[in-house]
Image: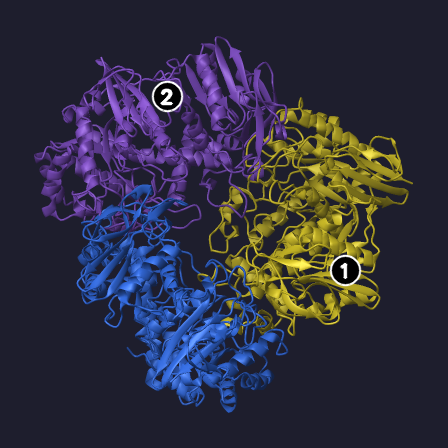
Chain colours: A yellow, B blue, C purple
Amino acid sequence: MRNGRMSEVTSALSGRLAFGGDYNPEQWPEDQWPEDVRLMQEAGVNLVTVGVFSWALLEPEEGRYDFGWLDRVLDLLHAGGIRVDLANATATPPPWFSRAYPQSLPVDEHGAVRSYGARQAFCPSSPDYRSAAARLTTAIVARYAAHPAVVLWHVHNEYGCHNWHCYCDTSAAAFRTWLRQRYGELDALNDAWGTAFWSQHYYDWEEVLPPRTPAYQTSVNPTQQLDFWRFSSDELLDCFRAEARILRRHSAQPVTTNFMHFFKPLDYWAWAAEQDLVSNDHYLMAEGLGERGATHDLAMSADLVRSLAGGSPWLLMEHSTSAVNWQPRNPAKAPGQLRRDSLSHVARGADGALFFQWRASRAGSEKFHSGLVPHAGTDSRQWRDVVALGSELRSLAQVTGTSVESEVAVLFDWHSWWGLEMDSHPSADVNLMTEVRSWHRALWEQGVTCDFVHPDAELDRYRLLLVPNLYLVSDAAADRIAQFVRGGGTVVVGWFSGIVDENDHIRLGGYPGAFRELLGIQVEEFAPLLAGQQVTVTGLGRDHLATVWAERGQGTDAEVVASYADGPAAGDPAVTRRSRGQGTAWYIGTRLPPDALKEVLGRAMGDAHVVPVLDLATWPAGLDAVRRRGADGSYLFAINHGGEPVRVPAEGTDLVTGRDWTTGTTLAAGDLAVIVQR
Amino acid sequence: MRNGRMSEVTSALSGRLAFGGDYNPEQWPEDQWPEDVRLMQEAGVNLVTVGVFSWALLEPEEGRYDFGWLDRVLDLLHAGGIRVDLANATATPPPWFSRAYPQSLPVDEHGAVRSYGARQAFCPSSPDYRSAAARLTTAIVARYAAHPAVVLWHVHNEYGCHNWHCYCDTSAAAFRTWLRQRYGELDALNDAWGTAFWSQHYYDWEEVLPPRTPAYQTSVNPTQQLDFWRFSSDELLDCFRAEARILRRHSAQPVTTNFMHFFKPLDYWAWAAEQDLVSNDHYLMAEGLGERGATHDLAMSADLVRSLAGGSPWLLMEHSTSAVNWQPRNPAKAPGQLRRDSLSHVARGADGALFFQWRASRAGSEKFHSGLVPHAGTDSRQWRDVVALGSELRSLAQVTGTSVESEVAVLFDWHSWWGLEMDSHPSADVNLMTEVRSWHRALWEQGVTCDFVHPDAELDRYRLLLVPNLYLVSDAAADRIAQFVRGGGTVVVGWFSGIVDENDHIRLGGYPGAFRELLGIQVEEFAPLLAGQQVTVTGLGRDHLATVWAERGQGTDAEVVASYADGPAAGDPAVTRRSRGQGTAWYIGTRLPPDALKEVLGRAMGDAHVVPVLDLATWPAGLDAVRRRGADGSYLFAINHGGEPVRVPAEGTDLVTGRDWTTGTTLAAGDLAVIVQR
Amino acid sequence: MRNGRMSEVTSALSGRLAFGGDYNPEQWPEDQWPEDVRLMQEAGVNLVTVGVFSWALLEPEEGRYDFGWLDRVLDLLHAGGIRVDLANATATPPPWFSRAYPQSLPVDEHGAVRSYGARQAFCPSSPDYRSAAARLTTAIVARYAAHPAVVLWHVHNEYGCHNWHCYCDTSAAAFRTWLRQRYGELDALNDAWGTAFWSQHYYDWEEVLPPRTPAYQTSVNPTQQLDFWRFSSDELLDCFRAEARILRRHSAQPVTTNFMHFFKPLDYWAWAAEQDLVSNDHYLMAEGLGERGATHDLAMSADLVRSLAGGSPWLLMEHSTSAVNWQPRNPAKAPGQLRRDSLSHVARGADGALFFQWRASRAGSEKFHSGLVPHAGTDSRQWRDVVALGSELRSLAQVTGTSVESEVAVLFDWHSWWGLEMDSHPSADVNLMTEVRSWHRALWEQGVTCDFVHPDAELDRYRLLLVPNLYLVSDAAADRIAQFVRGGGTVVVGWFSGIVDENDHIRLGGYPGAFRELLGIQVEEFAPLLAGQQVTVTGLGRDHLATVWAERGQGTDAEVVASYADGPAAGDPAVTRRSRGQGTAWYIGTRLPPDALKEVLGRAMGDAHVVPVLDLATWPAGLDAVRRRGADGSYLFAINHGGEPVRVPAEGTDLVTGRDWTTGTTLAAGDLAVIVQR
């Protein structure tokens, strides 16, 4: 684990939180650049990301570089006191490259070549792309390693966002290489993939292909698909590794690439281990998450990113001042939302809040994406809000380096995610993020902060472990969870967990295979619900209507907490609880509605002696409260996303306003406070 | 018609109904095989299908065969008294084959090559596939023709399920060959296809192609499409024929391939003529058919399959003990449903009930498909239900060889189906199965059993003939129907019938061309209804709301039974009736709601003197009753799919329980009886 | 502007309105042709379009022509007194051509070749297609230029209907040629396309491609897309130009090609300038336009086509007697609708009403499309209606050559349309036709006739100018509008107008850039509404609920007519009005519901002193009234599409019935009158 070097960046920023964004001066006339620096100073910007999409300008033809304009940009920024997160510019190869190396273009699952003219139009396995990217990286780091403005290296950009899978012949060969490393012998692959099914036995490595579109209405071998997800994440990680290696060889500054939090294609646990500091891009989804869903997403994504960073401070590399441009409908942020959203990340461990981008573009695909400087110019509410945010962030400098603590962990595994959502399963309504979102939200709405953990993580520091939809699990991970419970921990396992091993082979003998013993249940058969179908769950106070899933089975030596009153599993247990060693193991066998899930997780919190961050009888809707703790004291971030004032029972001083805080102080609707307690 | 050799199979099973399923031992360790045989014996399994997807293991490289493991499987089964339906294993070629012969891969309508890794990834016209399949078949039959366990040959599997159409150049050439045989001269094709339209005249056979995706928002010549459906069914049938010929040359055992009942791509009337016995796979659709729709589908599909078998006993080759895995949501079967579903097929002429598959798989695409042995093992309700079913089937041995009689026939033609649902028609809401389903259900809900018949069938044995949506009809078939009516039969013709000839050419002079005279109506213009639009039909007791279709026209010398009270055909006839010779000809000009359709068909049943199988004032919801008749007596199958007990007015002895049955005996909710009457 | 030669056609028809349709005798036996002519005479048909899809029959092999059958057709028609609009038959190349020149097939955005077997299966840039089309055109005009039946040349058919974009390599090369002509230097393209964004800088023309499908979930450069729309329209226009040039070289008769009114791919302003007379095809959309939407569409499309014709009489080349066959559901026309629909076009300047097609086809993709002679034959209501329409049109001969006058114009620009609906915009719910349709309808429902105008048009002749969603506008056009207002005109500008320049570059400094000064408003930020979201607009009488769009900003020196009462722009102006010079400039910042839009446009009509064509207190639903004016008097067309009689306050004589008309005369439900006033 390289991680943990965010402090070097904040040190270079005089101990302040990072504030700024992507700066793309090449889109604007050079005579405007000095004005940019002046405005950055006005806003308190101290860190900008430069060069992300500059390959075409930096390397006008193969092997010839033009750094003149970038020299001038960096010098100007440095002169203005602005630090630089310098990209190695490999995110999108120029048209000349794609034309010269047409084999480098990505190919989709149907065999169609995807063209250039947008971004990331390359096959991650392309040797031509890789060597061109290496040469460019070498040239850039050679020129700028010593530049005093550069405090951070930004590798590529949002890896895999548009080329997460490539099915070309080059990818096929790379996939085979990866498989040989994984399996050694071909027969091991045949066993793992279960090729005795559907006449798929392989006799020669060369026969093995990516999961390209098969004949009509049939589906490719699931382990082949699963391994292709694994390979594709690893293959892009190889790209990162190669470029990071070059940067590190020539520069002492930390290296990062920007994550996209719950981005299915990349196993960020593996990626995080390769970062000098973890950075993330976060954008609000305007539709589809329901009331306060986007607000909750701020918290959930930040919890993940902090966890990926191993608890160290991390960097919010991109978010938006207001609207984005790539959703079906892109609403503007409400007044006050900019600071609440930015501070939500800081509350959960970000030591900086950067934006895409400095100036809203005039041309191109993202010209309707908001920026720090809007189209309307600086005589605008948007700009005034940006300046105010810069000022506010300056006042919070002392939180840099502090960390968030949590007693609860949510187990999250990309490999299980890939397996879970495969075709040909009992129900197409199974969706990991829906489930994780509802579980995390049940904590968030009760004021409980949590981490995410990898199946291989040490669990001792937690009191409560949540395991939603962990379809695929290794024996080792299942053992670790059982050990956690025996050692006094409380675990809550969700439905359709523990079903298969790493090869997507069913764990026989009754579901949920890997957790059957731990939970004391024996499920004979899944009974998925139809679209719109609901079943009544009794035993959790009032009756609740559950959806999507039910199961036929029995508790063997578990306490039946709730049962199905009707539906295909009528009479069978829906929620069970079992004491095991010094700990407790809960099971939830269906998709509970929010209130019921809150009830069950609340009881499990009781078992685990977990309490909210604030002592409130009921948690006010929209209040986000998190504590960061440092050597000198703690910082309670209280952000009122709601429409009513709320009392925040804490004592200390609000760093933002400087006023004293007592347990009776209220936070106005839409307002926030950072209450320091020494 | 080869058909009728199911009795050879049941003879080999000591006169019992077949019971068992697909057995894929290659997916499991060999040391588990003896336990499989033991469990088969426990359950009363007497027939298993082996080798369906074993090509890759049986022929590890081109021309080299490895039969060792299969020898051991067959010997073990034989020793255990289990008979074998042996596959020729051509259903899915191995990866080595597809790699060696990439031209054998299927190509979709957009020109994309479909890859292997799933199943049926071959072009049906591929000479490479065909010769490889022939060699494999020869090798298998040569080795196992004399094996005493083998009582039936299973050719391929679910032909066309995933490669029903292939648009590659090889298919194009084969299509041309087929067209030359059909048309002789190219000008006959030009006439048939109406190529004077849209500048499509062909001057050279080589110009003719499959209906590949055309320019944007336009549609390919409809007769070209129709002929491509015909060709594609025939081309796969050629594959079957070639493999069956090899089997028959070397073995005296009967040969079959498993149908999929209402499977649009294959004209099973033509296929049935090539089977030694007809076999079928049936799976319940969990969603989309409405209340009791799936239960009714059991009856309707079995009626079709029995009809394809020419009334002879047939074999249910696959169904499921509980959930499948390939629908969006795959519910488990309800308690008791397994026996009701299995017996539903037997009631309608199946002399056996096999399942996919013996053991639920541990890996692969179908691992969540239920089996006779579930993942949970044999200490489970599922296994106990299987054992009970085996026992029940043993008690019904005497029904083997008996046949179902019917006085009603539904005319069903694949060619008309293909034509009916073509693009560029008056309404995209026209759908054959929707219509056939509602007509058949109107009979089923009144306790009337029916056959399906081909347009060329002899009709004399029936009293009532239903003709829903017979869009395309030959002069000969139309004449035969008219003849049937003149001879005293009753016919009910549905809307959008008799419109075109075999070449999809409009029958001019007013709709419904081929039946205008017979029905005594003259329709000037179709008046399709918009989405959600309803029209009121008066004259059938209370008013009814019809959908999808209306017509402007007049009865010429028909009695107007019902009329449109509003909508685009207000005042025009909706339902007519005309006496013709000794018979009666009804016409239904719109999609009637279920009650109205029942009313009209009920009146037609009155004209035809057709009565239900049981004498009940009203038919109870969910009661399925059918009579099989043999030389020694009749067997009334009464299956209560409903939730209430029902009285079954019959006299005899229930074969299942052994108890005497009188006209007052009731059948419990969910229960069934097979009442023998000598 | 060549336009204006429709009078030559009507002269050749003895001063009558054209009546007839596409005649495709090649689809029928030759011995039926004389009967066709006899029936044409019976119906009063005087003009038929021949040969549109006859290429395959006219040129059986490359360079060999067979004109015999066409000679006989033309002679027969001529002998019967029927004039001919003769096609040059290039609309669809024959199969032999596509086989010989496979590179001529179109390629879609995914790289898939589209096959022949339907129509227009050619790449517009294909040199093989172009030279074959030129040769064919030359042969046809050489043979028939002197034929006395031919009064009009019909080039191709519905250009671009199925091949509006082609992405093949030939198209790519042609696109580059077009771009070189537009930009001269490659750096001008780089500037225009904003290639500094996303590393897209071009260094060699050969690197430039059509906007082919890019990597997953990203979008191609918007100016590249915009220019590809421009190129594609121009490229097809080049095809037209080349064929028209050949016809004009050999024949003195006028030349046209049939437009499809609001057809997005073709910039008909540019196309209209190349027509000797403008012709149009119009079909009713059965679903999607709401109540009376299709009726209103008749008026709106005819207003556009008349405007494209520069106010000159034009020709309705195709419409339908009843149902079409290419919509999901194709209803029949209601009784009386045929004459109302046909006359709606004549009312707005059409000097003829032709149909697709003479005889409903017996085979092929359009066999369910209605014709003048239906499948049912001539003993049918449909045929009698056709004969009656022919008679009615004869009675209206004196309207030929007269013109429609209007005081209101709607600005309509294809280039802005293409830009407006690009991906990556603030809201995917923005749709030009939705907005134009609602604005035009607000006029139509108040009895006000309007023209459409190009941004470069002279505006002096109008009092009121509507500018809905003019996203893209040049400086010159914006200046012209401002000038119009200063000169006393009234303008109403809709939201999301004036945003970008011709290169799709944002006009900085606040929205709506190009109109900010004129309107006196300063919008800081768009605030698109979510799906289903509504905001309350106050100030227009009662409150109204607006959708899709809102904006945050201020009137600078405009009067705030209406404001948002809630939602993301609460308190900000929704509708403003500003006096400017002698004129008035209105702004509507959201999608108003119909009543509110009517209210605002009504007030603007007040400012502009625009009055309805009839003096009615309230305009009856479904009444369409338009005045054509000639040298000898005016013709008031009054068409009552509604279900109630309406009073039509006019004085004169009804040309249809011959009866005198006074201000108290009423028009029956579904009836029409043409009141001549001298």
Viewer-proximal residue, C298 or A76?
C298
Residue C245 is at least partly visible in this image: no
Residue C511 is at least partly visible in this image: yes
| Of labels 1 and 2, the one closer to you | 2
User: Label 1 is found on which chain of the structure?
Assistant: A
Using the rendered view, name the quadrant where residue C302 is placed.
top left
Disc 2 is placed on an element classified as loop
* Proximity of marks 1 and 2: CB atoms separated by less than 8 Å: no
Position of the N terminus of chain A by quadrant: bottom right
Question: Quick check: C161 left or right of A336?
Answer: left
Q: Classify C548 as above or below B27.
A: above
Using the rendered view, name the quadrant where residue B207 is placed.
bottom left
Dot 1 and dot 2 within a common chain = no
Question: Quick check: A404 left or right of C3?
Answer: right
Q: Amino acid at mark 2?
A: Gly
Label 1 neighbour load within 10 Å: few <14, some 14-19, many 20+: few
Q: Amino acid at mark 1?
A: Ala
Q: Which residue is mark 1?
A: A457
Instruction: Please identify the residue farthest to the top as the structure is shown.
Output: C582
User: Label 2 is found on which chain of the structure?
Assistant: C
Q: CA distance from mark 1 to mark 2?
A: 75 Å
Viewer-proximal residue, A91 or A627?
A627
Q: Which residue is mark 2?
A: C447
Position of the C terminus of chain A by quadrant: top right
Viewer-proximal residue, A106 or B292?
B292
Q: Classify B602 as above or below B309.
A: above
Could you say where residue A179 lies in the image, as x and y percent from the top left? Answer: 60, 65
Number of marks present in the image shown: 2
Residue occupying the point 19% across, 24% down: C657
Could you say where residue C677 lies in the image, as x and y percent from the top left? Answer: 24, 14
Q: Classify A280 as above or below A107.
A: above
Instruction: Please identify the residue farthest to the front as the structure is shown.
Output: B664
